[in-house]
Image (cartoon, grey):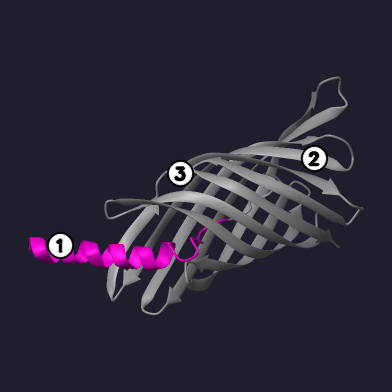
């Protein structure tokens, strides 16, 4: 029995090294503002590039990996104070590559609050999202499910510049299959904070950047076109 367990651990370790060491790339996402950013019935499309780091736990091992992801997203104004976002991403996990789909709901809450001399305001809101993805390569497969809940605000610097911030609960669970043997994993921590800023180039085009802290760390860039 002991030899069998040791064999499983060595099998797991070999699989993890194969997955995480070559390029050290896996789960990463750019969340964006935690409240709606388009008006009712308005449509927008965008792209995001991100590089983040998040620790996971799997069968007694703790791993940390630099993550990259390329995402295309679509925003739709469901109501004046509510928005849906759909995402499709390519996911890299070492030498493996796969895809991910995500869906989130964002809603503003309360009235804007003036800050400073009243030249700036804070708008408050929240997001709830779910994402599912899978990757595979040469007998090694991984799939995962992530649930995100965040609440925060957006500060209007002026009509073209905004900064945003949020506290987030992010639950990550998944399974890695190595040579037909399954190993469950989970995020090492579920609590974090993130923030970013956006700049409007014109009425329909904006660009921005985002940073993550606590459960994950890193940097993302994004751009969006509104119709």
Give the mark nearer the N terminus: 1 vs 2.
1
Seen at 91% across and 53% down, the residue is: 203
| Quadrant of image for the N terminus | bottom left
| Residue extent of the magenta highlight | 1-28
Say which mark, if any, is on residue 5.
Answer: 1
Q: Mark 3 highlights which residue?
A: 190
Q: Locate residue 138, reporting x and y percent.
A: 39, 80
Question: Toward which corner of the image does residue 139 lie, by quadrant?
Answer: bottom left
Question: Residue placed farthest to the right in the image?
Answer: 202
Foreground pick, 165 / 11: 11
The tag earlier along the polypeptide, 1 or 3, is 1
Q: Name the element at disc 2.
A: strand
Q: Is residue 155 above or below residue 103?
A: above
Residue to which mark 2 is pinned: 162
Look at 38% across and 68% down and name the residue there. 18
Residue 165 placed where, x, y %? 66, 37
């Amino acid at each position: 029995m002991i030899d069998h367990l040791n064999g499983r651990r060595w099998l797991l370790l070999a699989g993890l090294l194969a997955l995480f060491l070559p390029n050290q790339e896996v789960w990463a996402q750019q969340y964006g503002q935690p409240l709606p950013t388009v008006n009712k019935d308005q449509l927008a499309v965008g792209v995001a590039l991100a590089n983040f780091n998040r620790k996971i736990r799997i069968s007694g091992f703790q791993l940390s990996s630099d993550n990259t992801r390329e995402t295309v997203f679509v925003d739709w104004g469901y109501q004046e104070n509510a928005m849906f976002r759909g995402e499709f991403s390519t996911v890299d996990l070492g030498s493996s590559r796969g895809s991910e789909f995500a869906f989130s709901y964002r809603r503003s809450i309360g009235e804007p609050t003036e800050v400073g001399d009243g030249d700036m305001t804070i708008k408050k809101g929240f997001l709830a999202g779910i994402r599912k993805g899978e990757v595979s390569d040469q007998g090694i497969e991984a799939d995962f499910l992530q649930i995100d809940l965040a609440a925060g605000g957006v500060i209007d610097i002026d009509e073209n510049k905004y900064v945003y911030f949020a506290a987030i609960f992010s639950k990550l669970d998944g399974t890695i299959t190595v040579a037909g043997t399954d190993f469950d994993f989970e995020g090492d921590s579920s609590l974090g904070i993130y923030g970013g800023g956006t700049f409007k180039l014109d009425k329909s085009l904006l660009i921005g950047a985002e940073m993550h802290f606590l459960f994950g760390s890193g940097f993302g860039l994004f751009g969006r076109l509104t119709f």
